[in-house]
């Protein structure tokens, strides 16, 4: 009985942690197109698979019913962890930024003191774990002392 319950809960977890973000990934990939989509999709896919594995551990620890609620609690905990963990927080928050800005956000990095940003549609626009800031407008990016990356 416990094994069957864990199986149902892990199925629900797959829906919450793999299925829902996969839909967001498809939407972002369509918006990004090309090389930028691949550079975002690969680390993002790794992130959601790792999130699922962490969620399985949480499912084994959590002991309550119904199974879908147990899976939802595990998924929420995994998302919160991903949003505050270095390197995963950027990838986890990017889809949220797309919604917040009503489109693709400006991506900025302070890595190696670059303090530069890339705009959507630019040839160098991509998202990696090294990007740490998002802006909806260039005015916001400039006000935060970032400059446009021109290579």
Image (tube, rainbow, N blue to C red):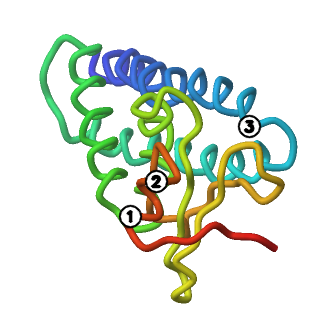
Question: Which callout, 3 or 2, points at the residue further toward the start of the chain?
Answer: 3
Give the percent coordinates (x, y) of residue 100: 39, 32
Closer-to-camera residue (115/131): 115
Give the percent coordinates (x, y) of residue 76: 27, 34
Give the percent coordinates (x, y) of residue 123: 83, 54
Horizontal side of residue 107 vs 69, given as left or right: right
Closer-to-camera residue (135/78): 135
Which image quadrant is residue 79 in? top left
Q: Residue at x 53, y 70 (%)?
A: 109
Say which mark, if any, is on residue 143: 1
Contact check, label 1 and label 2, Cβ < 8 Å: yes
- Which image quarter is the C terminus in? bottom right
Closer-to-camera residue (117/11): 117
Q: Nearer the viewer, mark 3 or mark 1?
A: 1
Q: Secondary structure at mark 1?
A: helix
Residue most toward the left?
A: 64
- Residue 114 position (above or below residue 4): below
Question: Which callout, 3 or 1, points at the residue further toward the start of the chain?
Answer: 3
Say which mark, if any, is on residue 32: 3
Distance between the Cα atoms at labels 3 and 1?
25 Å
What crowding class fits label 2: few (fewer than 14 Cα within 10 Å), some (14-19), or many (20 or more)?
few
Query: Which residue is denoted by mark 2 in the rendering?
Result: 139
Q: Residue at x 58, y 72 (%)?
A: 116
Q: Residue at x 63, y 43 (%)?
A: 45
């Amino acid at each position: 009985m416990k094994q069957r319950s864990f199986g149902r809960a892990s199925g629900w977890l797959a829906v919450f942690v793999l299925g829902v973000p996969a839909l967001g990934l498809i939407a972002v990939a369509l918006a990004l197109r090309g090389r930028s989509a691949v550079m975002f999709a690969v680390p993002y896919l790794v992130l959601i698979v790792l999130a699922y594995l962490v969620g399985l551990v949480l499912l084994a620890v959590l002991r309550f019913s119904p199974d879908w609620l147990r899976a939802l609690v595990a998924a929420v905990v995994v998302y919160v962890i991903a949003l505050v963990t270095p390197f995963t927080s950027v990838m986890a928050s990017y889809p949220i930024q797309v919604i917040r800005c009503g489109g693709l956000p400006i991506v900025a990095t302070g890595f190696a003191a670059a303090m530069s940003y890339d705009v959507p549609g630019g040839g160098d626009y991509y998202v990696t774990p090294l990007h740490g800031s998002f802006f909806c407008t260039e005015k916001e990016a400039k006000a935060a002392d970032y400059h446009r990356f021109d290579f």
